[in-house]
Amino acid sequence: MGRQSLTSPLVVAFFGLLGLGQASHAAPVVTDPGQGVVAVSSGATGAAELSGITYAGGSTYYAVGDNGATSIWEITATVDTATGRLTGSPSVTGSIAAAGMGSDAEGIAYRATTSSVFIADEVGSTITEFGTSSGSTLGGVAVPAIYQPSKVQSNMGLESLAWGAGGLWTANEEALVPDGPLSTATTGSWVRIQQFDSSLTAVGQWGYRTDPITAMNPFISAERSGVVDILPWSSTELLVLERELGGAIVPTFRSRLYVVDTSTATDVSAFATIDAGGFTPLSKTLLWEDDFGTQSNFEGMTYGPTLDSGLQSLLLISDNGGSLSQNMLSLAVTAPTPVPEPGSWALLATGLGAAAFVRFRCYRASSKR
């Protein structure tokens, strides 16, 4: 055994302790299998304006609509794990009555350990948990007062909901009253992304700036640019789906997917307003974007099954309100790769332990000669 094999663990540990040669966490990569949008059939269920979706395993998904129906919709959709494409026609196959879910359900998140879903109501600024077997109410989440209805402007309240990375996540669509104006053609809007831990206690809140509207349109007055859903990608990183409606000639829906890292931003839970600055906002990196014209208004997002390649399938669902189309879109995203915490004593101990083991093996080998 040569000198390099004997000393390299010590070198790695030493430089790791100094913070040199640190490995960085690779950003997720989103890929599109090229299938395009696929129509979702509601059959005779009456399901409409689907604005939130969550994966329950196999080919089962749950969805909610923002048209006032107090139903948890059951969707059957199959992803070909070899190609990442949807097979057949996704369809709404049933419903679960859930009285008390609110009149404007926008987000839904499945918790497998309790076979329950959390549902966010934009009008009431509430998050409620329901059992999927009976639709019974299991409890509510104490949403911070900053999100209360009186502080929500123009129906831009709680739009996102996701379960993962040890807890529950939500966000408003565009700025709350204390946080400044809604998005314009020159500036985006401030959004607060909120985390609750596994006991549903609020534990963190971060400021996020949406993109400006590409252009204001002379034929409509509903231009917007806001956050419509989020998903945890790692313990501190989130995928954020932005939806924009704008355009100088023909109004179109644009979807953009970003990644953010809460560990590099300021917790703004105690800030009465984030419009005045004085904090480090979430820095976002664009992963994917597409223009869906006048037909697909994608508002919901969820992971699906893991693909044969190791990629994670990612499904979007569109709201068909206003004579639009109710579609799904299948994408894929890379899984995060864990790396050792650089510059830590733990890394030094690991390196020293490895070096000691190598030295012992070398000693045993030389003593047998």
Image: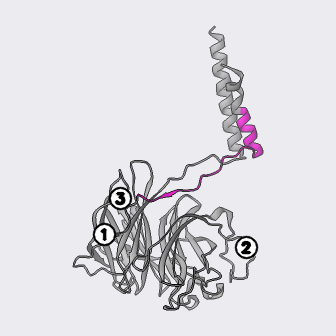
**Quadrant (top left/top right/bottom left/bottom right) for the C terminus:** top right
Let me know if residue 58 is in the magenta part.
no
Q: Amino acid at mark 1?
A: Ile
Residue at the outermost front position: 249
Q: Please tell me which residue is depicted at 54% across the width and 53% down the height of the picture.
A: 336
Tell me which label, 2 or 1, sits earlier in the chain: 1
Distance between the Cα atoms at labels 1 and 3? 16 Å
Residue name at image x 24 percent, y 79 percent: 45
Colour scheme in use: one colour
Residue 198 at least partly seen: no
For disc 1, the neighbor class at 10 Å (few under 14, some 14 to 19, many from 20) is many
Which quarter of the figure has residue 187?
bottom right
Give the camera-side residue of 290 and 142. Answer: 290
Residue 75 seen in this snapshot: yes
Q: Which mark is residue 85?
A: 3
Q: x%, y% of residue 195?
A: 56, 70
Image location (x, y in percent) of residue 252: 47, 80
Q: Residues within 10 Å of mark 3 (few under 14, many from 20)?
A: many
Q: Quarter of the image holding residue 205?
A: bottom right
